[in-house]
C-alpha cells in the first residue's frame, strides 16, 4: 500500500551459552502500480523502489522471496517494509507475521542491504539463507520483529553486520541458528551506536572452520568500538569455538565486546 569499552547490558537472561506498496509474489508483475493486492508488484525490490521515491509503506504477502544469484534486497530510505500479510488486509493492524511469514532468502550473497540513510524501517519479515541476513552501512534503521535464521556460514555477523557508524535500533527480533566463521554469529557491530532490546538469541555459533589457531568470539553478539546498549534480551545455547576440533572459544559464547562503551 503506497501512502503519501564495554557494552551496556541490562536485565538480560542468559541460559546454557557456550564461549504502501504491495508485494505479492510470482503471480504478480512489477509493472503493476502496487496500489492494491490485486495490483501487487511481483518483487519486494520493485515495491521498495517505488515507495522510496515518495515515502510510504511496503506490505509483503506471505511467501518466500528468493533473491537472484549474487543479488540482495536493497532497502532504501523512506520506504517502510512490513511483512506478515495473508494478502487481503486493508489495515496494517490485521497482519500476523508469526502465521503469515514473509521470508527474504539470500542466494550466494546477503539477504538484504541498507546503506547510508535514515527513515529505514523493516518490520515483521524473515531474513534467511544468506551469507549474512543483513548488512547495514552508515544507516540508522529501526529493525523490529524480524527473524534472522539459518544465515551463514559466512563472515563476521552472520545474522546481521553493521559498520561505518551505523546506528541501528533492534527490537523484538529473533536470531536463531546463524553461523559465522569469524565473530558474532547473531550480530556484529563495528564502530556503531547500537541498541538491542527484547530480542532472543538462540543456537547461534561463531566458529573458524579453517584456522585452528584463530579465535572466534561472540556466538550471539560481537561489538567492536562505538557504543552498544543490550537490554532485556534472552540468550540460549549460543557458542563460540576456537578450532575445527571444537575447543571452547575465548571470546564469549553469548557476547564478545572490545573497545565498546
Image (cartoon, helix red, strand yellow):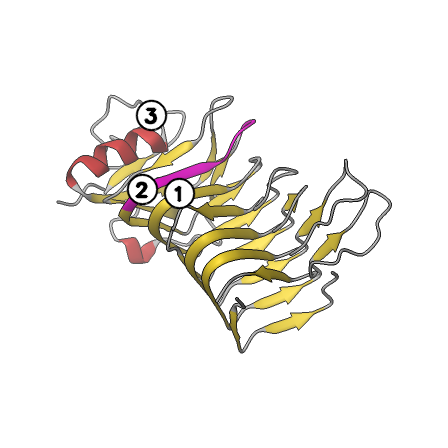
Mark 1 crowd level (few <14, some 14–19, many ≥20, 10 Å Cα): many
Q: Position of residue 38 (x, y in %)?
A: 26, 32
Range of magenta residues: 107-117
CA–CA distance in space, label 3 to label 1: 31 Å
Q: Which residue is mark 3?
A: 28
Q: Is residue 109 magenta?
A: yes
Q: In the drawing, does residue 15 fall left or right of residue 98?
A: right
> What residue sits 57% from the left and 35% below the top?
131
Can residue 35 be seen here? The reply is: no
What is the C-alpha distance between the residues marked 2 and 1?
A: 6 Å
Residue matched to label 2: 116
| Earlier sequence position, callout 2 versus callout 1 | 2
Judging depth in this view, the residue of 31 and 39 nearest the camera is 31
Circle 1 residue? 137
Measure how far apart labels 3 and 2 are at the Cα level: 30 Å
Image depth: mark 3 or mark 1 in front? 1
Residue 71 appears left or right of 187: left
Amino acid at each position: 500500500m503506497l501512502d503519501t569499552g564495554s557494552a551496556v547490558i541490562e536485565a538480560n537472561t542468559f541460559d546454557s551459552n557456550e564461549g504502501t506498496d504491495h508485494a505479492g509474489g510470482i503471480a504478480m508483475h512489477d509493472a503493476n502500480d502496487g496500489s492494491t493486492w490485486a495490483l501487487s508488484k511481483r518483487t519486494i525490490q520493485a515495491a521498495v523502489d517505488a515507495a522510496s521515491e515518495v515515502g510510504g509503506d511496503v506490505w509483503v504477502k506471505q511467501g518466500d522471496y528468493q533473491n537472484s544469484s549474487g543479488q540482495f534486497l536493497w532497502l532504501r530510505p523512506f520506504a517502510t517494509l512490513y511483512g506478515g500479510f495473508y494478502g487481503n488486509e486493508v489495515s496494517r493492524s490485521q497482519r500476523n507475521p508469526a502465521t503469515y511469514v514473509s521470508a527474504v532468502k539470500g542466494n550466494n550473497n546477503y539477504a538484504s542491504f541498507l546503506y547510508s540513510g535514515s527513515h529505514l524501517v523493516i518490520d515483521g519479515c524473515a531474513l534467511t539463507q544468506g551469507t549474512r541476513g543483513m548488512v547495514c552501512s552508515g544507516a540508522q534503521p529501526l529493525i523490529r520483529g524480524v527473524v534472522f535464521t539459518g544465515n551463514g556460514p559466512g563472515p563476521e555477523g552472520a545474522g546481521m553486520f553493521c559498520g561505518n557508524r551505523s546506528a541501528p535500533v533492534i527490537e523484538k527480533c529473533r536470531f536463531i541458528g546463524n553461523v559465522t566463521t569469524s565473530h558474532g554469529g547473531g550480530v556484529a557491530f563495528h564502530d556503531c551506536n547500537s541498541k538491542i532490546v527484547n530480542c532472543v538469541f538462540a543456537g547461534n555459533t561463531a566458529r573458524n572452520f579453517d584456522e585452528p589457531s584463530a579465535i572466534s568470539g561472540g556466538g550471539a553478539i560481537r561489538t567492536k568500538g562505538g557504543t552498544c546498549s543490550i537490554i532485556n534480551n534472552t540468550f540460549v545455547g549460543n557458542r563460540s569455538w576456537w578450532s575445527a576440533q571444537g575447543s571452547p572459544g575465548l571470546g564469549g559464547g553469548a557476547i564478545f565486546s572490545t573497545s565498546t562503551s
